[in-house]
Image (cartoon, rainbow, N blue to C red):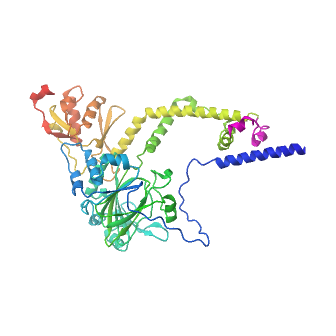
Amino acid sequence: MEDGNGSSRAALKRKKLKKKKRKQQHQPLVAPAPSTKKKKKQKQQPGPSPPPPAVESSNDALQIVQGEDVAPDAINNAMKSRTQEDGDSNGRRLLRALLAPVGARCFYEETFERRGLLVRGRGSNYLSGWCSTEDVFRALEQPATSGVDVDVTRYDPSSEKRKTLSDGIISATWARQQLDQGATIRLRQPQDRLTKVQALCRALEGEFGSTIGANAYLTAKDGAQGFAAHWDDVDVFILQLEGRKRWRVGACADDVYKLPRVSSEDFDEEALRRLCPHLSEIVLEPGDVLYLPRGFIHSAVTEGLENSLHLTLSCHRANSWADLLEAALPSALSEAIASDPKMRESLPRDCLHYMGVAHALESSDDEAADESDDDASLTEVASVRYDPEIPRSRSLQKKRRQRFAERCAGHCKDILARLLTNLDATCDDRSVAFVAERLPPLAPEKGDPATITATTRVHCVERRDARLVPGEAGVLLYHALDNATSHRGRPVACLEFEEEDAPALEALLASHAARPVLVRDLPHSSDADRIAVAASLVAEGLLVVSASGHEAESSDSDG
């Protein structure tokens, strides 16, 4: 008995050692969120070591480009209307002007979502005229609510957090007093109140295919700071308009924080050093533009004896592959559940005996050791008397786990196939949502439908203003020309057409100033139908008569 008990205890000890080793090898699948709690300082230890000295030069996380040779009026020229170019190219011209001398293609291939970019040296007046201090206070002369239209804040060094000073309705006079006392005024969505900012945002919406947000930050002079270090869930273009500001920017060392879908909390210095050990320190002067991908930690303080004003233009909020799939998966899953009875079958009644993290650890032991060890685990041996169907051998347990995973994989393949089938419909839904949130043109030109004939040449003003989608009976054309300035201010405008009109509508929406469409060439059954479709879009302002106007009747043979 003693020998048997001794060998049993030895075997049990080996089992426990194996389980302990497996537990140590098991790692969590999701990295924990960064903690900003301060650790207790140990006795007799010096204070925290300062971060490494910041260097104002290009590196892997930040590229710095000089733009002395850029034309001083490049942005004004980019925003001028053109008669022989597609309206969407306004956004491309604006992007090139903001980042000049960096080209748009170079930006997308080498910088976008990868690293920051600072363009400087183009002169203090390069960005002048688009937003000013007086514009901010003029906007605040309209009723402004704290937390909706404006925030007045100050950075609190003791807590290393942002402190909000504003509450309720904010007046321009009170905001100016707070600025004089060292505060920061953040004008939210200035495009709702300032037409020039609206023009910038609308142009970039055409370039990026997503809504553009904006904030204007007016910060007191002489080292004032309004916000703690943090990252945003959007890509931002920071336009320094007045004064100087010293920025600390950097990418998190761990890729798990790259391109986050939510903004971070405020970071103290300890968390900042842990997340981003290599920070770049740069100074923005009037005319400079700084691009930061979402997830880049940043903070800023003013420099000098002049208040600082910068305008932030943001894009790509909730516009990732994750957001697309998150929208597509529920409908694909619901469709699979409704149409496939196998999806509704019960799970194996004994699956909990071999599925779960604990069973995964047991089945992941070294296979060489498992070949000679078909004994059940201690828990399984103790349970046999209650349920003889629990798999006693690890090989049987592994086979059942494999069959379970294969069955689940089969269902996933079916769901994926349905997702791909419905992908166009999901993209249509996102496009309609974008059209509903787009900023409208400052002065849409609605034409006279009575002037449209079969010999009229027309073109689309801006393709991204409209979206054609299938309807229950026919097709629907949503457009943004009647949108309110404030996003979601009113229901999106929608025109209903017959299904036979769809090819003609697609041809009209694909046209632009450099490639107008002759009405009689539209794919439809008769000139009357062609004229009716084109005239309806002219009346809405989606189409305009091209510079070439009407074609002479004698040119019929030339097409």
Q: Position of residue 390 (x, y in %)?
A: 73, 36
> In this orientation, does residue 438 appear?
no
Q: Position of residue 19 (x, y in %)?
A: 71, 46
Return the residue nearer the eye: 204 or 6: 6
Q: Quadrant of the C terminus?
A: top left
Asked which quadrant contains residue 323, the reply is top left
* Residue appearing at x 14%, y 32% in the figure: 455
Residue, far right = 1
Asked which quadrant contains residue 523, the reply is top left
Return the residue nearer the eye: 346 or 306: 306
Q: Is residue 295 above or below residue 435?
A: below
* Residue appearing at x 63%, y 33% in the figure: 402
Q: Position of residue 312 (x, y in %)?
A: 34, 58
Return the residue nearer the eye: 360 or 371: 371
> In this orientation, does residue 26 appear?
yes
**Magenta span includes 269:** no
Locate residue 506 relative to residue 225 in the image: left or right: left
Q: Which residues are drawn in magenta?
A: 366-387
Q: Position of residue 431 (x, y in %)?
A: 36, 41
Return the residue nearer the eye: 377 or 517: 377
Q: Quadrant of the N terminus?
A: top right
Q: Is residue 508 above or below residue 258?
A: above
